[in-house]
């Protein structure tokens, strides 16, 4: 893309004093991996791609199903039964074909996690199970990478930044994973589509703040109750 076109495309970010040309260059040089292309991963991918992240990765092993479409807004009816990574690739081609977009059509497991995460500066946890969450936390600690964490259930969402500039991590607030049989999930308990949109957008904002050197809350879990419209922070 020509320099004039780059400025025009990202001008509304560049006009912000705290971002400017320097911040936009940092964004365009950044390398970010999103794990999960579902309800949280969709808005994270949308906003990071729109912001012009230089290298954007997506890891997911699932396929698009019709029940995904109420909240997983990068996917469409035309992409039902496609892999979510392929569907995401279609979205990126249409929205911002200038970024370097990489997909990994595989489940992240202990034997491949470090290799998948290593090329990226920031990891964004949009997964939907605690096994993956704890594994991502472990590998980010080993590799010294910040981890942007989000989760949703019903009307409630949570958000935190772990392992950033010496801050605490997942085990400091949730030392042990819950019993899998006691963990609620969207398949059984449901979720309203705007909730992952809210949390995912906030996660994307945290990523951009990390990249551009803006203040980031450390050692705090933000809890959003959209039923009663309450926002609170838990220090840990």
Image (spheres, rainbow, N blue to C red):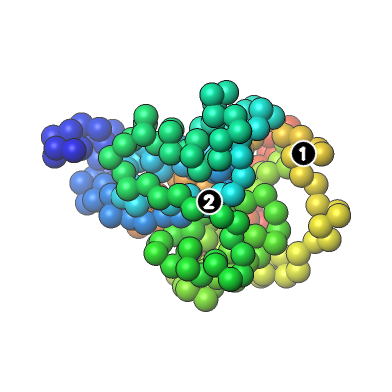
Q: Mark 2 or mark 1: which is in front? A: 2
The disc at residue 20 is none
Please state the horizontal and vertical placement of residue 170, each as a whole percent of the image: 64, 65
Q: Residue at x 56, y 35 (%)?
A: 82
Q: Nearer the viewer, residue 110 or 54?
A: 110
Quadrant the N terminus occupies: top left
| 146 displayed left or right of 184 | left
| 184 displayed left or right of 204 | right
| 134 displayed left or right of 184 | left
Count of picture labels: 2
Q: Residue at x 66, y 28 (%)?
A: 66
> Which residue, as the protein is rendered here, is positioned at the far right?
181
Work out whether residue 32 can be spotted: yes
Helix, strand or loop status at disc 2:
loop
The disc at residue 105 is 2
The vertical placement of 93 against 113, above or below, is above
The vertical placement of 134 against 23, above or below, is below
In 3D space, how far apart are the residues under numbered discs 2 and 1 (Cα atoms)? 22 Å
Please state the horizontal and vertical placement of residue 32, each as a whole percent of the image: 41, 54
Q: Nearer the viewer, residue 54 or 18?
A: 54
Quadrant the C terminus occupies: bottom right
Q: Residue at x 58, y 64 (%)?
A: 136
> Which residue, as the protein is rendered here, is positioned at the far bottom?
142
Please state the horizontal and vertical placement of residue 60, each as a whole percent of the image: 56, 49
Helix, strand or loop status at disc 1:
helix
**Residue at numbered disc 1:** 187
């Amino acid at each position: 893309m020509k320099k004039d076109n780059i400025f025009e495309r990202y001008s509304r970010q560049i006009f912000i004093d705290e971002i400017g040309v320097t911040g936009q260059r940092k964004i365009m040089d950044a390398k970010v991996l999103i794990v999960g292309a579902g309800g949280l991963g969709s808005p994270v991918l949308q906003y990071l791609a729109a912001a012009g992240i230089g290298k954007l990765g997506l890891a997911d092993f699932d396929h698009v199903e019709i029940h995904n479409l109420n909240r997983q807004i990068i996917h469409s009816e035309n992409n039902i039964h496609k892999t979510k990574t392929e569907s995401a690739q279609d979205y990126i081609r249409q929205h911002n074909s200038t970024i370097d977009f990489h997909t990994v059509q595989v489940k992240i497991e202990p034997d491949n996690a470090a290799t998948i995460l290593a090329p990226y500066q920031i990891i964004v946890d949009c997964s939907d199970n605690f096994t993956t969450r704890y594994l991502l936390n472990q590998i980010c600690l080993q590799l010294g990478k910040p981890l942007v964490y989000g989760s949703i259930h019903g009307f409630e969402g949570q958000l935190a930044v772990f392992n950033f500039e010496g801050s605490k991590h997942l085990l400091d607030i949730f030392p042990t994973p819950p019993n899998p049989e006691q963990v609620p999930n969207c398949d059984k308990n449901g979720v309203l589509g705007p909730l992952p949109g809210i949390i995912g957008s906030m996660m994307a904002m945290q990523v951009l703040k990390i990249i551009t050197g803006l203040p980031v809350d450390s050692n705090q879990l933000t809890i959003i109750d959209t039923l009663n419209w309450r926002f609170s922070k838990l220090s840990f």
